[in-house]
Amino acid sequence: MTDEKKVEEFKNYASFLKEIKKRIQIAQVKANFAVNRELILLYWNIGKMVYEIHESVGWGKGIIPMLAKDIKNEFPEIKGFSERNIGRMKTFYQEYTCLQDAEVKNANNDNTRSNLPQPVAKLDEILKTVTELPWGHNFILIEKIKDRQKRLWYMEQSLKHGWSRNILDIHIKSGLYERKGKAITNFDYTLPPIQSDLAQQTLKDPYIFDFLTLDTDFRERELEVELVKHLENFLIELGVGFAFVGRQYHIQVGDSDFYIDLLFYHVKLRCYIVIELKKGSFKAEYAGKLNLYLNAADDQLRHKDDKPTIGLILCQDKNKIVAEYALRGLDKAIGVSEYQLTQALPEELKSSLPTIEDIEREFG
């Protein structure tokens, strides 16, 4: 019997092939991971050598262009050793080791050491984390985030959710770290502790919809349509785990018809999420109407294995005190957040821009 006939008669060949392909893919992932780790360690060690020579011999910046030129002449086929990148390697090493040394020195010189904040992470722990990230991710984090606690959070989230460099950049620019878990909610007493914490961290405040182009006198329905039209950007802003179910989703309660603005399912929370969009400030009656929607969704949509449905009201002004009073006593999980159509300018930039009065004076 030929080998071909043996293969044909092998009834489990499909599963056999599937297993082989799975093993190849796992090996490829491990190989890519190993290559990346070795590359980052190489950059770290080169950065260390350049930094130490600079500190001990005092060669100054002249060493980097000389090194870039000689490496290019010796290894013309190898990329990644330009002046700029070697400078980044030095910064990469210096950024973590110098800050770590400063923390240790300050702690040793202070008798009240127990009152000092603990270092974010030990150097070996940091090195383990940075070698898991691609070089582009690492340098975006160094260039754009100086606070080590915040930087470590973005590192962990990038690894956890598999963020691309572009997605990481979007989240940094939008200030995700500062907005995470800031929505006003009643989750503490409407959800079990573990789900309450996860749900709270899933929501943010404010949401930034700067990918939309709406006039200031837009209507709620226009906002809804535009968000669905730009669904990919909307899902990025909502965060990991949101799956779009429908817009103006119809539910019937008795003889009355109701329409949910936006309905999502969250794959990690294992529940439906009802989002209501409102223009202007939060009003107390919004919570009552959403409470009705959540009851209906639980009765009509929720599977026996699903967690209770969660509601989110998005307004231009969350009206904090009114929202807190309105949510108190409700037995359904509801959050209230603001949304912005343009991202607020940093205070230091605001102060450098001319006011309307300045412009009017300039043009007479």
Image: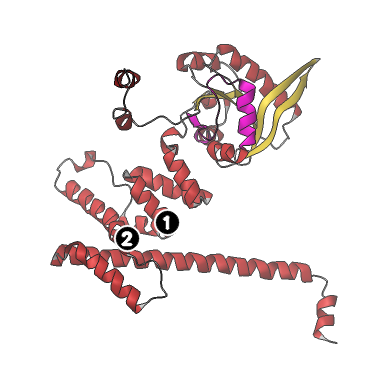
Foreground mark, 2 or 1? 2
The residue depicted at 38 percent of the width and 47 percent of the height is: 152
Residue 222, labelled with which disc? Answer: none
Q: Quadrant of the N terminus?
A: bottom right
Which residue does the image show at 53% across and 16% down from the upper left?
282
> Quick one: SS at disc 1?
helix
The answer to whether residue 309 of the structure is visible from this angle is no
In the image, is residue 210 part of the stretch drawn in magenta? yes
For disc 2, the neighbor class at 10 Å (few under 14, some 14 to 19, many from 20) is few
- Going from N to C along the chain, the mark reached first, 2 or 1, is 2
**Residue 117: % across, % down:** 27, 41
Q: Position of residue 276 (x, y in %)?
A: 61, 24
What residue appears at the point 29 percent right and 31 percent down from the top-left corner? 348
Q: Give the residue type that dot 1 points to.
A: Gly
- Above or below: residue 189 compared with residue 284: below
Q: Which residue is mark 2?
A: 84
User: Does residue 219 appear to the left or right of 2 in the view shown?
Assistant: left
Which residue is farthest front?
364
Q: Is residue 17 left or right of residue 100?
A: right
Examine the structure image and report whether residue 46 is included in the region drawn in magenta.
no
Where residue 150 sits, quadrant-wise, is top left
Residue 346, image x, y percentages: 35, 32
- Find residue 284 and report its horizontal and vertical position in percent: 56, 12
Query: Secondary structure beneath disc 2?
Result: helix
- 173 lies above or below 292: below
Crowd band around label 1 with a 10 angstrom C-alpha radius: few (<14), some (14–19), many (20+): few
Q: Residue tagged by mark 1? A: 136
Q: Relative to residue 191, is residue 63 drawn left or right?
A: left
* Mark pair 2, 1: CA separation: 13 Å
Q: Which residues are magenta?
A: 201-230
Quadrant in which the C terminus appears = top left
